[in-house]
Amino acid sequence: MSTTACTPLPSIDEVKEFGTEKLINFLREKLQLKEKYLTILRDQEVEGRTFIFITLEVLTKKPGHFELPFGPAQRIVTFISELRGEEQGGSQIQDILRSLMKFEEKFEKKFEKVEGTVGKVEKTVGNVERAVREEVGELKREMKKVRYFEEKWFSSPGTGTETEKGQFVIDHGAIIGLPLTLTQDRRRNTLGKFQKPPNILADAKPSEDEIQEYFIDECKALRTLSDIKLHVGDTHSIPLLDTRKPDFVFIQKGKPLDPLNVVAVGEIRKRTGNNFKNADIGHAVAFGEKVLQLQPRRHHVYAVLTDCINIRIFIIARENNNCFSYRYTASESLTYDTSDPPNGWKYLVTIMQSSPDLLGWIEPSIKFEDGNTVTLVRSISAGRTSIVYEGILENSERTVVVKKAKNESYLPCFTNEKNALTKLSALNSPHLPKLLLSNEDTLVMTPLCSKVKNLQIKDIENIIETLKAVHSNFQLVHMDLRKYNLLRDDDGNILIIDWGYSKKQGENAPFAGALESMPDNILQSLINEDQINYEPKIDLICLDLGFGIDLGFEIWNFKVFNFASTYKYNELLLIKVNFIHADLDLEYIIHIHTNHNNLDHEIKIIY
């Protein structure tokens, strides 16, 4: 129940202005917290501007500044979300789940009508395809909402907008001079002096692409200076940092563009006044934080913010519990139009002349307690809980997969996956990853796999046989069976990966898993806030629904639209999947018929 049902809450801007005592009184009234918890907040001199950025991890961390029990800590962060107009896993997620249930009923009714008109398909195929496309589009939009709120359940509550992040950096960071020995170089040629940026005139309205191109060209000209160690790479259209696209990065000469090789990062933003906006600062700083997330051993990183006229440098440092601290320079001129270069120009050239280690970059590797070291070669992917790398095991040429937690809040998932893979190793299955090394936040596994481009009949049989062995021998339910968690190794074997959300059958535990692939009874249990019944058939239904919702797997290069019965008209392909649930046995029958070849293939596996 909302804590604000009777009286309206103040705006987030009003809360920002609260002093410590006003904030304490406000929380006492709204949350009825025990005085001992309010005293802790008072002792830490928490004010409104700081309060709105507090996370669950900060409040519960031991040892830490607050060390609150989970209950009052969760009430505080949920209240912060309410102040921001958010609902952490509350009524909005329930509304979305209900809307998904209603949508499924609507879709099934519409699809029944489609099935009833199969005989007229040649005349109506255009309309049918458009209708299905519209319905799938609606479903994907609903799924996007669910993923957003599902992400909120597992992420740090209280994280603000870029504007608020920028304001936080300025308020809580420290202003400094650039902590590097400034270059003594001068430049004679016009190129590289930033004298004619396209936005130099007040009434000029260049596009962002024009400003971007100008900056990169000027930086290329600076490569002729002495002792240049880093080049500026144009990455504004490349999702280099997971899915994010920084405008430019500093990278060692000869190194490939990869997140592990980024030495410093930069962003180009148009100023609307004399200073960069808080949103501009927050945007640039966020890229620096992302670099630290992708480079696990690194302590700090430089982020450059410029509009080709002025420049500002931010230093983002990793602190305990993956929090960050900030230092920054004043805004300095980049335009070199006198005999002596301005400080901003010196800042840029100094960074380009600095060795990577001076800027915080560390050769990417991870050492383990048993003495083993894994060198990280490249980043492969980034999910909600982890970053995945290709690595090389020291003193061998063995290629491995390295999975590292994004932050401490995901460590329980890693412990769970480690325990699951340790148990499953007894199966010695080619369809399961092999755990080689681990520590608290890292798993090292083999084999290195690639994405599945198409599913073959034998793949489905192997997946179901593997699940059968896991369910019967270890009573484990995967709970996250989606196409992203099925990979293929170099020998052609299909592998089931990501066991971090797996549950013991009958376990009394909070929900975790792939919401968009869950059966109706699980969604209904979430809506009703009932205990989840973890059972084997969840995995098989997830597998089926994963095909239908993702629309991404192929069998013999035929797309699988896997609802009750589906027709792909241009190949006259009928794929029919039946799940028959008995009290004791589960029978899975997959029939694939093609009128074109008169084929009739069947897979039949009985539990």
Image: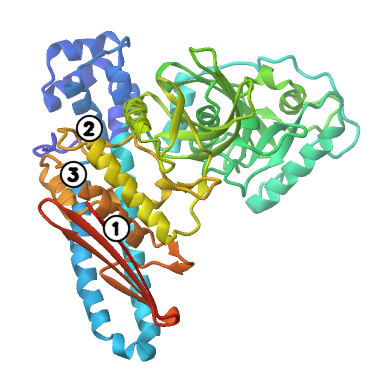
| Dot 1 crowding, Cα within 10 Å, few <14, some 14–19, many 20+ | many
Q: What residue type is disc 2 on?
A: Thr
- Circle count: 3
| Dot 2 crowding, Cα within 10 Å, few <14, some 14–19, many 20+ | many
The local secondary structure at tag 2 comes to helix
The local secondary structure at tag 1 comes to helix
3 vs 2, front mark:
3
| Residue at which label 3 appears | 535
Identify which residue is drawn at 63% across, 35% down: 266
2 vs 1, front mark:
1
> What number is the disc on residue 600?
none
Answer above or below: position of 372 versus 508: above
| Residue at which label 2 appears | 78
Q: What residue type is disc 1 on?
A: Leu
| Residue at which label 1 appears | 545
Q: Is residue 313 visible?
A: yes
Whether tag 2 and tag 1 are in contact, CB under 8 A, the answer is no
Residue 396: x, y in percent? 63, 24
Say whether disc 3 or disc 2 marks the residue closer to the N-terminus: 2
Identify which residue is drawn at 71% across, 39% down: 233
